Image (cartoon, coloured by chain):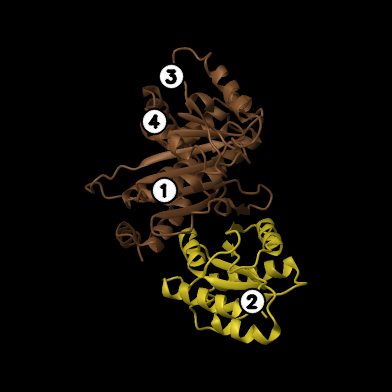
Chain colours: A brown, B yellow
Amino acid sequence: MNQDSLLKSAANGNRRDLSRLLTHLEKGMKLNLPEDSPSRKSSVMGITGPPGVGKSSLIGRIISYWKSRNQNVAVLAIDPSSPRSGGALLGDRVRMESADSGELVYVRSLSTGGQPGGMSSSLISMIELLSYCGWEKILIETVGSGQSEIKIVAFADKIILVDGPDRGDIIQAEKAGIIELADIIVINKSDLPGAIKAAESIRSSLSFADGKTSPEVVLVSAQRNEGIDELMDLVENCDSPDWRERIKIQERLISLWDSRLLSSPDLNRVISELQTGSISLDDALDDLAR
Amino acid sequence: MKIVMAKPGLDGHDRGAKVIARSLRDGGHEVVYTGLRRTPEEISRIVMDEDANALGLSTLSGAHDVLVPRICELLRETGMGNVMVFLGGIIPDRDHENMFSSGVRAIFGPGSRTDEILSFLDEANSRVESGAPIGVGDEDGWRWN
């Protein structure tokens, strides 16, 4: 089946064909969505935070929350691929109890390897496709363990940063700048000792931020299903600051630039020339951007 | 290959499935693990949503005679006849023929080596490249063991 008929069928609710199209996009293919289509606006929520803080469990709860309100939700869960073998073990579904249960939920696991044009640019197309196919709520899960999570700003309308009690990782998050971009900071595992203290120390560190509206800090226990309704109320009612929109556009521009650069047919030649030292980095960039 | 590793039915031991998932990852495959106690309907939906090329089933409970044919049938019914199915766990010899005729292409019992499973996937891959059928809905009688 060609892309056009796949797209038509996916837009009519065929999951099998939606999955196939997502695979195309994952492999770096482009997809032209019809421009005259009625624009369906989805809300895209990014969930990030260090490994092991309970992002997937929290997403499981958020899925149930929306499902019980009869809203459909699509999840893209991103895990790193092994740099050595290129393989990946994608286990986020295990912790999303409600992920496999019906027409209203679509969950797709993605690995960071294998996108010739970079992860961000294929993600942007995937989100556009899901939105075109009528998925109202879109959730993106990324592991944030360094500076890369800042990219989440390129595709998410709302960003939730998740942390656990007494991890000290929030300092890392602060370094990476994500804390300023978050709309809401969730301290998960609120049933464990130290959670309240962690929330307070984050609140106090945020209170030093000058001028900008600082994110709300919420205590949640995904395991015990506590604090989810409060969190979702905040999510629906918080307005992201105007400057976020500018950063979003800027990040999208950078992603597209990266993607063009990485998928240039001259890339290998230019890298070899750089390796032998016959051209400078500036020359190389001019060459590729021509 | 993109492979879904699934635990159908009620048994609660998934050390084996996890070891296989890990070694397939180290062999360069993309593996999605479902977690325990999935129904045939859930498993076929996961394979669909993930657009996987292969499905590995692990079962120790003795219910393979019911679960495995049901899963294979669901895959065929929902347009996923091109997905390859392989099986591991406790599958008595006398049940092997029934499993193979349901559409399973390989069975790996206790004592199997992970490199053998990787060789099986390599061969499956080269069959796909040469256009030879390996899917659960394909008639061709190729099987690994």
Chain assignment, label 3: A
Q: CA distance from mark 3 to mark 1?
A: 31 Å
Q: Position of residue A288 (x, y in %)?
A: 48, 37
On residue A126, the disc is 1
In the image, which is nearer the foreground, mark 3 or mark 1? 3
Q: Chain of mark 1?
A: A
Say whether mark 4 and mark 1 are on the same chain. Answer: yes
Residue A81 vertical position relative to residue A186 in the rendered view, above or below: below
Query: How far, Cα to Cα, is label 1 from label 4?
Result: 17 Å
Look at mark 3 in the image and give the residue it sits on: A213
Q: In the rendered structure, are the residues bearing label 1 and label 4 in contact, judged by CB atoms less than 8 Å apart?
A: no
Mark-to-mark CA distance, 3 and 2:
58 Å
Q: Is residue B81 visible?
A: no
Query: Horizontal and vertical percent for residue B13?
Result: 69, 64
Identify which amino acid the numbered label 3 is placed on: Thr
State which mark lies toward you, 4 or 3: 3
Give the crowd class for mark 4: few <14, some 14-19, many >=20 residues within 10 Å.
Answer: some
User: How far apart, in angstroms, are the residues tagged by discs 4 and 2?
Assistant: 50 Å
Amino acid type of the residue that numbered disc 4 sits on in the rendered structure: Ile
Along the polypeptide, which appears first: circle 4 or circle 3? Answer: 3
Disc 2 with disc 1 on a shared chain: no
Q: Tell me whether marks 3 and 1 sit on the same chain.
A: yes
Q: Residues within 10 Å of mark 1 (few under 14, many from 20)?
A: many
Q: Quadrant of the N terminus of chain A?
A: bottom left
Mark 2–mark 1 Cα distance, whole angstroms, equals: 34 Å
Determine the secondary structure under disc 2: strand
Name the residue located 44 percent from the left edge and 17 percent from the top edge. Answer: A212
Q: Amino acid at mark 1?
A: Met
Q: Earlier in the sequence, mark 1 or mark 4?
A: 1
Residue B58: which quarter of the image? bottom right
Residue in the image at 71% along x and 64% along y = B16
Residue bearing the label numbered 2:
B106
